[in-house]
Amino acid sequence: MPVAPLRRPTLRFLLSHPAHFIALGCGAGLAPRAPGTAGTLWAWAAFVVMQRWLPPAAIGWIILASLPIGWWACTVTARHMAIADPGSIVWDEVIAFWIVLWLLMPAGLWAQLAAFVLFRVFDAAKPGPVAWADQLFKQRGATPAAFSWRAAGFGIIFDDLVAAFCTLVVIALVRAW
């Protein structure tokens, strides 16, 4: 029997499965408005904490491990919500912004803020390559039963990785100029 799409997850949903907790960014995805921005802010705060206690190589390993874990968590959570790419799934923003910060550091607060703004613009507005990446694995209009759930988690993450890449390219161009 088909499951009705869960448009807005609750605290109960967040805590009902480890994948939900991860995919919803430890609760950041429950934000009533702009959950992607809330997830990116959570990623920034978490990165600052990791940076205080861990060397850059360890953070790199955490980011690397977060990719397959995030793929799984986003796939499971999207399936349980019966939506191909729920806005409340923010682990994609977390991983992508961790990559931006990891490659940007050491950087001051203003550079980090500029990276945050650039990343949010690329992620939300989806210009050029980000729009292409967003459409590549999405199955718009498909019924939940017809979704390719293996591709769903990767598709959720992929466009944010492209947004992170675009952010880093702009930062590199500004630095070179």
Image (spheres, grey):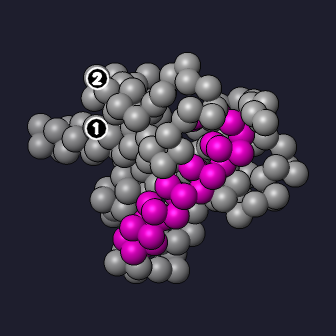
Query: Where is residue 70 drawn, in percent x and y?
Result: 52, 57
Residue at figure coordinates x 48%, y 49% from the top left: 150
Task: Kindly state the secondary structure of the residue where label 1 is placed.
Answer: helix
Count of number-bearing discs:
2
Q: What's the residue at 39%, 27% (across, down)?
A: 135
* Residue under the point 31% across and 27% down: 132
The residue where tag 2 is placed is: 128
Disc 1: CA contacts within 10 A as few (<14), some (14-19) or many (>=20):
many
Please report whichever mark, 1 or 2, sits nearer to the chain's N-terminal start.
2
Q: Nearer the viewer, residue 106 or 118?
A: 118
Amino acid carrying mark 2 in the image: Gly
Q: Quadrant of residue 16?
A: bottom right
Mark 2 and mark 1 in contact (Cβ < 8 Å)? yes
Q: Nearer the viewer, mark 1 or mark 2?
A: 2
Instruction: Say whether residue 72 is left or right of residue 38.
Output: left
Q: Depth check: 27 or 41 in front?
A: 27
Q: Nearer the viewer, residue 109 or 53?
A: 53
Spot the residue most to the left: 177
Residue 149 visible somewhere in the drawing: yes
Residue located 45% across and 63% down the image: 68
Residue type at mark 1 is Cys
Query: As rendered, which of 167 and 84 lies closer to the eye?
Result: 84
Q: Position of residue 62 (x, y in %)?
A: 45, 72
Q: Which residue is mark 1?
A: 166
Q: Residue furthest right?
A: 12
Image quarter hosting the N terminus: top right
